[in-house]
Image (tube, rainbow, N blue to C red):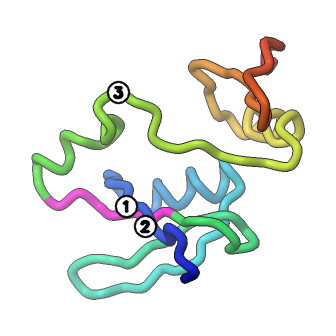
Amino acid sequence: MNRRLALTTLVVADYDEAIAWYTGKLGFALLEDIDQGHKRWVVVGPTDGSAAALLLARASNEEQRSRIGNQTGGRVAFFLNTDDFHRDHAAMLAAGVEFLDCLLYTSDAADDTPCV
């Protein structure tokens, strides 16, 4: 049996702002953007399409809007793997991404070297 997690929904305030963030700041690709009339089906993810992607869902009511930015109750929601951490970290910093905390993890253990 071959299974993998394909999409994770992320509630956002605005489709176009979220697309700009994930494609412009994080370097993801816009994989799908389908107008469904009352909403859009918007998927962003790694440029090669090899990993799980994010379904960007615009909040449609106050309860959903209250979850934007805190969808996991303060826990880390996503972990991004890369083949070159320092390259991608530098690119994200240059694009204006603000890192609140940063530890470099390898497959063996946390590296105590600062990211910046």
Number of numbered discs overlaid on the protein picture: 3
Main SS, magenta residues: strand
Residue 97, image quadrant: top right
Q: Are marks 1 and 2 in contact (CB under 8 Å)?
A: yes
Q: Which residues are magenta?
A: 54-60
Determine whether, in the image, residue 105 is placed left or right of residue 58. right
Closest to the observer, 25 or 112: 112
> Around disc 1, counting alpha carbons within 10 Å, would you say few (fewer than 14), some (14 to 19), or many (20 or more)?
few
Percent from the top left, x then y, of residue 68?
Answer: 30, 43
In the rendering, which numbered label is found on residue 63? none
Which residue is under mark 2? Answer: 55
At label 2, which amino acid type do we have? Leu
Closest to the observer, 81 or 107: 107
> Residue at the location (11% across, 55% down)?
61
Reading the chain from its start, which is encountered first: label 3 or label 1? 1
Percent from the top left, x then y, of residue 63?
Answer: 11, 47
Which residue is under mark 1? Answer: 9
Closest to the observer, 54 or 95: 54
Disc 2 element: strand
4 up-or-down from 83: above or below: below
At label 1, which amino acid type do we have? Thr
Q: Are marks 2 and 3 in contact (CB under 8 Å)?
A: no
Q: Are marks 3 and 1 in contact (CB under 8 Å)?
A: no
At label 3, which amino acid type do we have? Gly
Percent from the top left, x then y, of residue 27?
Answer: 71, 55
> Around disc 2, counting alpha carbons within 10 Å, would you say few (fewer than 14), some (14 to 19), or many (20 or more)?
many
Q: Quadrant of the N terminus?
A: bottom right
2 up-or-down from 112: above or below: below
Which residue is under mark 3? Answer: 74
40 up-or-down from 47: above or below: below
